[in-house]
Amino acid sequence: MNERPLLRVEDVHKWYGNVQILRGVSLDVTLGEVLCIIGPSGSGKSTLLRCINHLETLDAGRIYLEDELIGYRDERGKVVERAAKDLARQRASMGMVFQQFNLFLHKTVIENLIEAPMLVLKESRASATQRAHELLGQVGLAEKGHQYPRQLSGGQQQRVAIARALAMRPKLMLFDEPTSALDPEIVGDVLTVMRDLAKAGMTMIVVTHEMEFAREVADRLIFMDEGAIVEQGDPAGILSQPTEARTRQFLARL
């Protein structure tokens, strides 16, 4: 694995009103690394992902992708928010897959996949369509390109959502509990696609409650609670013998 940090999160704080959601979170993610984040509901995991791709603004701290400040520009020591067009360029480097699929219901699967590459990356329709078909094959949905999302199962829709994120050729993939809204019997298909991405060297941050997936696929595991990183390290070690009492308490409840 390349040890150069692709992503740097430095002392990030986030409040919603008077409630502090993130309390000085710092972490690095190296190129090709798979980082899984676990923790109880409300611990700040999803908010952290949304801060990374600037769906949420920061109250303090900085986030860098390949040494470029995300969401903001540094002007003589003063931080100013980036223009929408510049932010769209940055977000194109980070694919995000949510709990809900967020597909365009009035567009076919292929149309869902080609819209952003054509609009943001300025790819031709022919090029974007060819890439879309390749990605659908990659996620096991080669025959579904002309169907609409409502004609697909939840697991198939989530695999389309992954393909749509990959269509932007991201440097980093963010997964926010991508299997939590799925029936248990179809979770495996989505996790298989994610395993294949990890094997192919995609840099990934995965917020998950799938502990076996984290044990098998993650290079590093982070346990968060109350907006802070409580423990991090080797997934098997943390899941089998956590050193922090709060981690032990959380895992004992599962």
Image: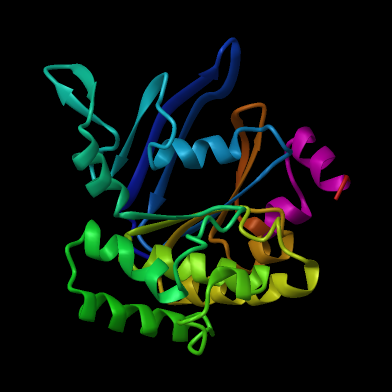
Residue 191 visible at all: no
In percent of width and height, residue 22 lies at: 55, 26
Q: Residue at (40%, 71%) from the top-left corner?
A: 201
In percent of width and height, residue 234 lies at: 61, 55
Q: Does 108 sit above or below residue 250? A: below
Q: Residue furthest bottom?
A: 143
Q: Residue at (72%, 74%) from the top-left corner?
A: 186
In percent of width and height, residue 212 lies at: 72, 65
Q: Does 176 sit above or below residue 23? A: below
Q: Residue at (37%, 84%) from the top-left corner?
A: 134
Looking at the image, residue 148 sits to the left or right of residue 184; the answer is: left
The quadrant where residue 114 appears: bottom left
Colouring of the image? rainbow
Q: Which portion, as a residue range, is magenta?
A: 236-252
Looking at the image, residue 58 sits to the left or right of residue 147; the answer is: left
Q: Residue at (48%, 64%) from the top-left corner?
A: 106
Q: Does 244 sit above or below residue 190? A: above
Q: Residue furthest top?
A: 18
| Residue 30 is covered by the magenta coloring | no
Q: Quadrant of the N terminus?
A: bottom left
Instruction: Please tell me whether the stretch drawn in magenta is mainly helix, strand or loop.
Output: helix
In percent of width and height, residue 159 lies at: 55, 71
Residue 231 visible at all: yes
- Could you say which is closer to the camera, residue 202 or residue 54? 54
The quadrant where residue 121 appears: bottom left
Looking at the image, residue 63 sits to the left or right of residue 211; the answer is: left
- Could you say which is closer to the camera, residue 1 or residue 183? 183
